[in-house]
Amino acid sequence: MSDDEIILSELSDDELVLQMHDDPYDGLREEIEEGVNILIARGWAPYDALTKALVAGMTIVGADFRDGILFVPEVLLAANAMKGGMAILKPLLIATGAPRMGKMVIGTVKGDIHDIGKNLVGMMMEGAGFEVRDLGINNSVEKYLEALEAEQPDILGMSALLTTTMPYMKVVIDTLKEKGMREDYIVLVGGAPLNEEFGKAIGADAYCRDAAVAVETAKGFMMRKHNRASA
C-alpha cells in the first residue's frame, strides 16, 4: 500500500501513534504535523502527544543511529520532521505547564565554526523533551556565561571539531570553577577529535560520542538530579 492511501484521520489512536513512530524515519514532516494536530483534536494532552508519539519515534531513530543503521543525513531529516511537531506542541506544553526533561544551553567553542554535530545534538535533545538554547558557533567564555546566567539551564553542552579549539573547553570549565559556578551545571562535551580521557582531563561531566549518546547521558544525569532533589 502506498503512503498516499494511509489516511491518518481514519487510524485509531494506537495505529496513528505507530505510524508517527515511522514518519520521522522517512523525514515526513507534514505527516508528523498532521498526526500531532489529530491527536490534540482527539483530546490528547500535549505532553502525551510529545512523549508517546514524538519522543518515542525519535528514540527509535536515536537507537538506529547509534547502531549504525541510520546516518547523519537521515537523522537530520528525522529531527526536522520532529521540529514540525514540536512547533505545534511547544506553546501548548507551556500553556499546560507540562513537565520538561530539563534545559540545555549548547554551542560550538570559540574559533570553531563546525555545527552539524551540535545541531544534531540540539535537535535530538529537543526530541527527547529537553528545552534547548542553541548559541551557534564560535562562542567565547563570555557568551557561554551570559547564556547560563540568562537561561539557568541544567546542562551546558560544548562542541569542537578541531584539535586546535578543543582546549578552549577547559578555559570555559576553569572559568566556571573560578566563579564558583561549576557545580551548578552538568557539562557535556563532544566532537570528532575528543575522547573520554580528554573529557575527564578538562573536568567535564561526560564526553558524548554522538547525539544518541548525548541524549542518553543527559537523561541519566537529569534522573539522578531529580532523585537527589526528591530524596
Image: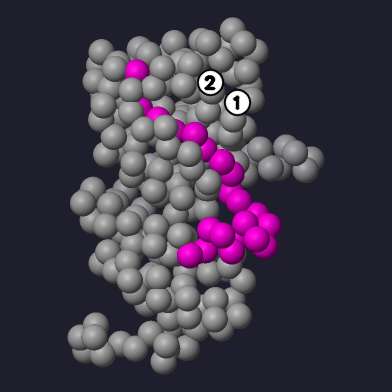
Q: Which mark is residue 149?
A: 1
**Residue kind at label 2, given as amino acid type:** Leu
Q: Is residue 42 left or right of residue 158?
A: right
Residue 101 horizontal/vertical position (percent) = 58, 49
Quadrant, the C terminus: top right
Are the residues at dot 1 and dot 2 in contact (C-beta closer than 8 Å)?
Answer: yes
* Farthest residue, direction right: 231
Residue 202 horizontal/vertical position (percent) = 44, 14
Nearer the observer, 54 or 193: 54
Rendering quarter of residue 139 = top left
Graded by Cα atoms within 10 Å as few (under 14), some (14 to 19) or many (20 or more), the crowding at tag 1 reads few
Residue 207 visible, this orientation: no
Residue 53 horizontal/vertical position (percent) = 47, 69
Please give the residue where the numbered disc 2 appears in the rendered image: 145
Give me the residue at 24% from left, 86% from top.
Answer: 4
Give me the residue at 27% from left, 64% from top.
Answer: 27
Residue 106 shown in magenta: yes
Residue range highlighted in magenta? 88-110
